[in-house]
Image (spheres, rainbow, N blue to C red):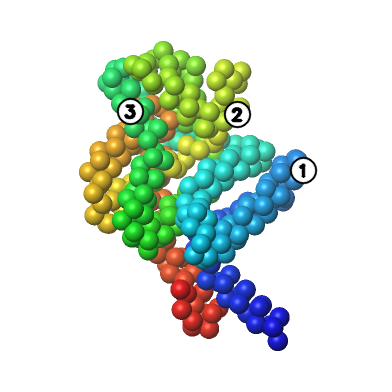
């Protein structure tokens, strides 16, 4: 009898604890593990990815349980915010899978689409407006990508609007997962490799004080170490869709939707960031168009998935309160 009660309490606690974002991350990394096992020829890859993800699931479930204990405030904080780190870690897993599957890059198609739509190469055309001051400003805007999303979430968190915060974290994580699927399906490196000489960017687009440092920082985040002998071979295939455009338009949308105090700063920085993706040669314009489409799909479908998970939890609890 006591064992049955204990099992029921554990089951109830589990259902109450696992949020939509937890389920999303577990499901996506599980799917990534299956892809690694079935389609990656190198056994060393799935032998790394699968145990890593299992460990990740254990941590997520532990944080989910611990976050319900009143005395474990720090663990609740970690449960609230861990998706920020998870997004980057999964990004690296996607990189490993794409590199080892050996898909063919679609850059030639994207270049031709830009030319059909605009009659020119946008990254070449926009270079006529380049200046060290503008390059510095736009490189800073480009690097502010994660900070703008964190800033939006932090404002909701600090004003204790936890329902909107929790949904926002889910929506952004979901958006990232969709963009990762795009990278796997449509691998591309972007115009800095195809239309321009990667090694000439610092000479052709010089900044003022911190542009070079920020540029190397971005390169490192995309698995291109400084001085790499063959940057193209190691670069992440993450040009299509433009995740920067997708997510920053989401930031601007939520800033407007939730009437954030910081919304005007986010509007300005977001606009500069979108311009920077082409000016700094990270993206084709069709990448940006795809990013907006992915953003619209994310915003359209995220509420259904989020509410669906909440309804499932209530059903599993026999109609009991999730609190």
Checking the image for residue 234, the label placed there is 2
Residue at the farthest top position: 203
Residue 158 point in image, percent of width and height: 34, 53
Task: Tell me the tag on residue 138.
Answer: 3
Which residue corresponds to the image point at 30% horizontal and 26% vertical from the top-left? 137
Image quarter where the N terminus lies is bottom right
Q: How far apart are marks 1 and 2 (CA)?
A: 20 Å
Q: In this view, does 312 lie above or below 106?
A: below
Which residue, given by chain and number where applicable, does mark 1 sit on?
A: 43
The furthest residue to the bottom: 1
Q: Which of label 2 and label 3 is nearer to you?
A: 3
Q: Compute the Cα span from label 2 to label 3.
A: 25 Å
Q: Can residue 122 be seen in this view?
A: no
Image mark for residue 4: none
Residue in the image at 66% along x and 77% along y:
7
User: Horizontal placement of 318 versus 295: left or right?
Assistant: right
**SS for callout 1:** helix
Taking the spot 52% from the left edge, 59% from the top edge, the residue there is 72
**Quadrant in which residue 44 is drawn:** top right
Question: Residue at the front extreme?
Answer: 71
In this picture, residue 309 sits left or right of residue 57? left
321 in relation to 144, above or below: below
């Amino acid at each position: 009898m006591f064992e049955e009660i204990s099992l029921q309490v554990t089951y109830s606690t589990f259902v109450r604890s696992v949020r939509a974002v937890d389920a999303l991350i577990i499901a996506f990394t599980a799917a990534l593990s299956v892809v690694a096992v079935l389609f990656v020829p190198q056994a060393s890859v799935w032998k790394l990815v699968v145990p890593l993800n299992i460990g990740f699931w254990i941590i997520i479930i532990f944080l989910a349980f611990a976050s319900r204990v009143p005395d474990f405030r720090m663990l609740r904080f970690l449960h609230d915010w861990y998706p920020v780190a998870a997004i980057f870690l999964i990004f690296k897993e996607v990189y490993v899978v794409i590199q080892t599957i050996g898909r063919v890059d679609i850059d030639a198609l994207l270049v031709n689409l830009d030319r059909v739509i605009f009659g020119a190469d946008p990254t070449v055309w926009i270079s006529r407006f380049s200046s060290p001051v503008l390059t510095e400003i736009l490189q800073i805007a480009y690097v502010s990508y994660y900070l703008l999303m964190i800033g939006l979430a932090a404002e909701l968190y600090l004003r204790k609007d936890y329902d909107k915060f929790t949904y926002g974290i889910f929506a952004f994580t979901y958006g990232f997962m969709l963009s990762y699927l795009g990278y796997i399906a449509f691998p591309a490196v972007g115009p800095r490799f195809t239309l321009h000489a990667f090694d000439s960017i610092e000479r052709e687009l010089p900044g003022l004080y911190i542009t070079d440092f920020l540029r190397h920082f971005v390169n490192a985040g995309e698995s291109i170490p400084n001085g790499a002998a063959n940057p193209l071979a190691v670069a992440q295939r993450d040009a299509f869709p433009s995740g920067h455009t997708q997510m920053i338009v989401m930031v601007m949308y939520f800033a407007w939707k939730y009437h954030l105090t910081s919304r005007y700063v986010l509007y300005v920085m977001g606009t500069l960031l979108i311009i920077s993706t082409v000016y700094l040669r990270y993206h084709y314009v069709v990448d940006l168009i795809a990013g907006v489409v992915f953003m619209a799909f994310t915003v359209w479908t995220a509420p259904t998935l989020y509410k669906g998970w909440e309804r499932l939890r209530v059903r599993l609890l026999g109609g009991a309160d999730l609190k």
